[in-house]
Image (tube, rainbow, N blue to C red):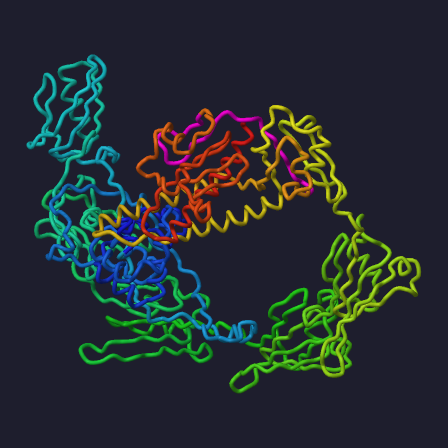
């Protein structure tokens, strides 16, 4: 229920998926024709993987928008309900499913049940120029070869090739040309269409008449119903039925009788419209008002194109009882030829009859589709319509599934052998019939007479096979191998008759030198291994060397050679002796480890004293005692006599350091000392990251009498979680240690408070602050002037008290030294209210936020998160005392 309560609908389709760039995740609701909810749900029910992918897409989109939700929380029933009830979600889900090939792109039939409303008929329509359309047809790629999913031998290339399956040829096909009329393009205004001098004028056209010479004047005139235009000082001129140039000359002659030396320029500024009727098998038959320049093709386009049963080869232009022209749309789609279409007049009709003979072409052709025939009779003609056969197609074996009218289905195979029969003649003589389905099969995906070379070689891959071929013919010398090949090699052979794989091992040096001949067979895979691929012997070196780690054991390798491979000693290395750990297998089959000390100084001077190594040896170079303490320093700043960076000796304590810096100044406030250690900072960082992950993974509260209450509770929980996460991520861990010191060093010297120093420690002694901080859910969070002997409740009241969202019962106090006073801080009879605690300068009172929901786990987690965030803030505030 979570996703729908939170969003009210599948907003992931509308917003969350906008960041995806791949074409298959485009979810525009207007990109495809409408699809019913039952069709979408049926497609999802039939494909569990697709259903899981849809849920995952929704969950990822919501998480990207800040909602912590998993795929498992989006159940199938809720997904189906949303698709059924929300049109926007249904459209986007349909596009998601369609883009993965699970829904047909066919336009749904127009129905009268109100679910698929018809487009408005008898509306003004404007033709669209063909060049504004996107390309509809592209040559498909070669068929995708799919390996068998159950193949266990994925690392054997010969079997992988032989297991490849050609794509199925019985997939649903779309009728060629149907998509041509599907995508909408922006209409072009009649005023934007250029008009030539041979355009024939008629009633309704608007013309512009420019007069120059003895009179200069521009006239706008509309050709009236009688075909005339009004002119100054002369009778109206009849220009209907005349071309633009003829009308211009006629007007110029007429005006020349009144005005001397008059010149006339005539242009059409607005075209008239004609009403035509598009009937027959089109998507939206009816009356359309089109531009006078529109062609029959524009009329069919305005009506949404032919339906699935409408003809694309025969479009009739009828005027009265006469057939003006007959148009074949394939001329445009296949050849780009529009033809010399006759102009249309008001009252003309465009008829699209039912489609004629249709055949389907699938398999290894360039344009698999259903084609309508008109004049094409033979199989060769049909293959030409489909763009021809792909290079991977088998022309000598073509299958035709045929329907014997009203009787039965049969299958016919055209088999032609180039040696005995001309293939072209066979294709041309094979006559096609209505309903035929032509399948052009592909050639086998695997190559014959092939062997494979793999592994530790310079140029792996396929090689041609010939009878009598051996390994030496395949690998001429060691130059064709990578450095240090193993002596062991193998051949993976596909044994007949079922081509099961068997492994034959051989010695590579013997095969290359000709000492032993290793014969090859067709489809053999020759594998060469590297020396270090098969349980390679190695030795390891650790400690004070430049490049510690494991190294291959070379023949005769010694301790000094391994030391050289590791880059030699570091400056902190003890160069006199090293530790060497070796293993040996005892007589009872157990491993025994032997530890011994190697005299490095002697081995480096005398080659005879060098110690040979064996597989598995571990050499450790020791470090000089106290080396890590060299250069150790701490930083002291603030209210001390001599602040700065000081070197320290091993075991030096805080009291010794403060004496060396001259002690504390009179203005110092040791109770607020900020002592930070890098090791503590790393621990704080790990704890902070763990806490952040726990907060992010926290589950929302369950409750609410109704969906409205549940939605409000959910929104409040998400906001609270996001707020605390922002605070945790914004405040880095401080690494602060709580110390208790005073200006009189002698009082705490050599006590547990006198901590031992470490390299990188920092100490800041602040000035005595004159305020107390009140922070968190209070009406006026601020720094309050310190008043002695006052408790936390007194300061809280002066800060305006807690807000409605503040939890006074969980208030806590952060002392200036970093210690915390909270609920249950006392023990036994001394448990007191936190707000009754007396405060000191620099202390901070924190009122946490009330927890959303009743979960004890979330309460504890939120309290810990708020405390961690406030501790980091107060550590930073100390430096401003």
Tell me the quarter of the picture where residue 114 sits.
Answer: bottom left
Residue 170 locus on image (x, y percent) = 33, 71
Q: Residue at x 30, y 68 (%)?
A: 46
Magenta segment includes 151? no
- Relative depth, front residue between 305 and 487: 487
Q: In this image, 228 relative to 722: left or right?
A: left
The segment highlighted magenta reads 757-784
Tell me the quarter of the picture where residue 462 sits.
Answer: bottom right
Magenta segment includes 778? yes
- Relative depth, front residue between 805 and 237: 805
Q: Residue furthest top?
A: 214
Count up the numbered dots. Answer: 0
Q: In this image, 611 relative to 77: left or right?
A: right
Question: Which quarter shows the N terminus?
Answer: bottom left
Residue 168 seen in this snapshot: yes
Q: In this image, 134 relative to 610: left or right?
A: left
């Amino acid at each position: 229920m979570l996703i729908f309560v939170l969003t009210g609908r599948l907003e992931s389709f509308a917003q969350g998926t906008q960041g995806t760039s791949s074409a298959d995740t485009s979810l525009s609701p207007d990109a495809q024709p409408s699809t019913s909810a039952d069709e979408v749900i049926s497609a999802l029910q039939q494909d569990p993987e697709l259903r899981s992918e849809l849920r995952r897409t929704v969950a990822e989109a919501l998480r990207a928008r800040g909602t912590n939700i998993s795929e498992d929380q989006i159940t199938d029933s809720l997904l189906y309900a949303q698709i059924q009830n929300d049109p926007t979600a249904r459209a986007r889900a349909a596009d998601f499913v369609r883009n993965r090939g699970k829904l047909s792109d066919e336009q749904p039939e127009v129905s009268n049940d109100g679910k698929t409303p018809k487009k408005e008929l008898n509306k003004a329509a404007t033709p669209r120029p063909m060049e504004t359309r996107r390309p509809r047809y592209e040559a498909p790629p070669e068929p995708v070869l799919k390996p068998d999913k159950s193949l266990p031998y994925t690392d054997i290339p010969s079997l992988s090739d032989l297991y490849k399956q050609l794509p199925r040829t019985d997939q649903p096909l779309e009728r060629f040309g149907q998509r041509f009329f599907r995508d909408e393009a922006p209409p072009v205004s009649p005023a934007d269409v250029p008009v030539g001098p041979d355009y024939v004028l008629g009633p309704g056209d608007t013309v512009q008449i420019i007069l120059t010479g003895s009179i200069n004047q521009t006239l706008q005139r509309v050709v009236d119903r009688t075909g005339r235009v009004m002119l100054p000082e002369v009778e109206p001129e009849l220009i209907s039925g005349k071309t633009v140039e003829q009308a211009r000359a006629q007007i110029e002659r007429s005006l020349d009788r009144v005005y001397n030396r008059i010149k006339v320029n005539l242009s059409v500024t607005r075209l008239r419209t004609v009403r035509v009727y598009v009937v027959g098998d089109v998507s939206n038959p009816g009356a359309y008002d089109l531009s006078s320049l529109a062609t029959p093709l524009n009329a069919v386009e305005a009506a949404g194109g032919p339906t699935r049963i409408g003809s694309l080869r025969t479009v009739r232009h009828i005027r009265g009882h006469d057939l003006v022209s007959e148009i074949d749309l394939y001329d445009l789609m296949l050849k780009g030829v529009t033809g010399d279409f006759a102009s249309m007049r008001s009252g003309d009709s465009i008829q699209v009859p039912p489609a004629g003979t249709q055949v389907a072409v699938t398999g290894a052709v360039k344009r698999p589709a259903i084609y309508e025939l008109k004049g094409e009779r033979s199989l060769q003609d049909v293959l030409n319509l489909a763009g021809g056969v792909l290079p991977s197609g088998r022309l000598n074996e073509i299958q035709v599934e045929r329907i014997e009218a009203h009787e039965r289905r049969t299958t016919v195979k055209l088999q032609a052998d180039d040696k005995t029969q001309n293939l072209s003649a066979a294709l041309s003589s094979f006559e096609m019939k209505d309903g035929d389905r032509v399948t052009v099969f592909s050639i086998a995906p695997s190559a014959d007479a092939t062997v494979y070379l793999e592994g530790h070689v310079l140029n792996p891959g396929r090689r041609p096979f010939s009878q009598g071929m051996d390994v030496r013919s395949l690998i001429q010398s060691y130059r064709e191998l990578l450095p240090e090949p193993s002596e062991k090699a193998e051949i993976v052979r596909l044994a007949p008759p079922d081509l099961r794989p068997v492994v034959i091992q051989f010695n590579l040096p013997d095969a290359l030198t000709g000492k032993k001949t290793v014969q090859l067979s067709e489809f053999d895979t020759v594998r060469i291994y590297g020396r270090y691929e098969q349980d390679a012997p190695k030795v390891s070196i650790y400690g004070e060397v430049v490049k510690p780690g494991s190294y291959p054991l070379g023949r005769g390798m010694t301790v000094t050679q391994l030391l050289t491979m590791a880059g030699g000693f570091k400056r902190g290395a003890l160069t006199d002796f090293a530790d060497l750990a070796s293993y040996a297998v005892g007589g009872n089959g157990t491993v025994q480890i032997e530890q011994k000390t190697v005299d490095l100084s002697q081995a480096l001077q005398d080659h005879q004293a060098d110690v040979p190594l064996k597989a598995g040896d571990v050499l450790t170079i020791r470090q000089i005692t106290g080396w890590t303490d060299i250069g150790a320093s701490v930083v002291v700043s603030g209210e001390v006599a001599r602040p700065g960076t000081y070197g320290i000796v091993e075991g030096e304590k805080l009291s010794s350091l403060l004496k060396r810096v001259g002690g504390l100044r009179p203005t110092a406030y040791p109770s607020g000392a900020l002592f930070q250690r890098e090791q503590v900072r790393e621990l704080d960082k790990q704890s902070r990251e763990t806490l952040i992950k726990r907060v992010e993974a926290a589950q929302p509260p369950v409750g609410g009498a109704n969906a409205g209450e549940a939605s409000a509770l959910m929104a409040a929980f998400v906001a609270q979680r996001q707020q605390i996460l922002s605070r945790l991520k914004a405040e880095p861990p401080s690494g602060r240690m709580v110390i208790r010191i005073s200006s009189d060093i002698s009082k705490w010297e050599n006590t547990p408070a006198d901590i031992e120093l470490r390299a990188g420690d920092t100490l800041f002694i602040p000035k005595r602050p004159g305020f107390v901080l009140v922070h968190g859910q209070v009406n006026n969070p601020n720094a309050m002037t310190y008043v002695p002997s006052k408790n936390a409740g007194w300061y809280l009241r002066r800060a305006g008290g807690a807000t409605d969202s503040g939890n006074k019962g969980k208030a806590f106090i952060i002392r200036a030294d970093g210690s915390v006073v909270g609920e249950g801080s006392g023990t036994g009879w001394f448990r007191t209210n936190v707000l009754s605690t007396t405060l000191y300068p620099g202390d901070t009172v924190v009122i946490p936020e009330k927890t959303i929901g009743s979960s004890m786990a979330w309460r504890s987690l939120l309290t810990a998160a708020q405390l961690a965030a406030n501790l980091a803030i107060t550590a930073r505030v100390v430096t401003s005392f």
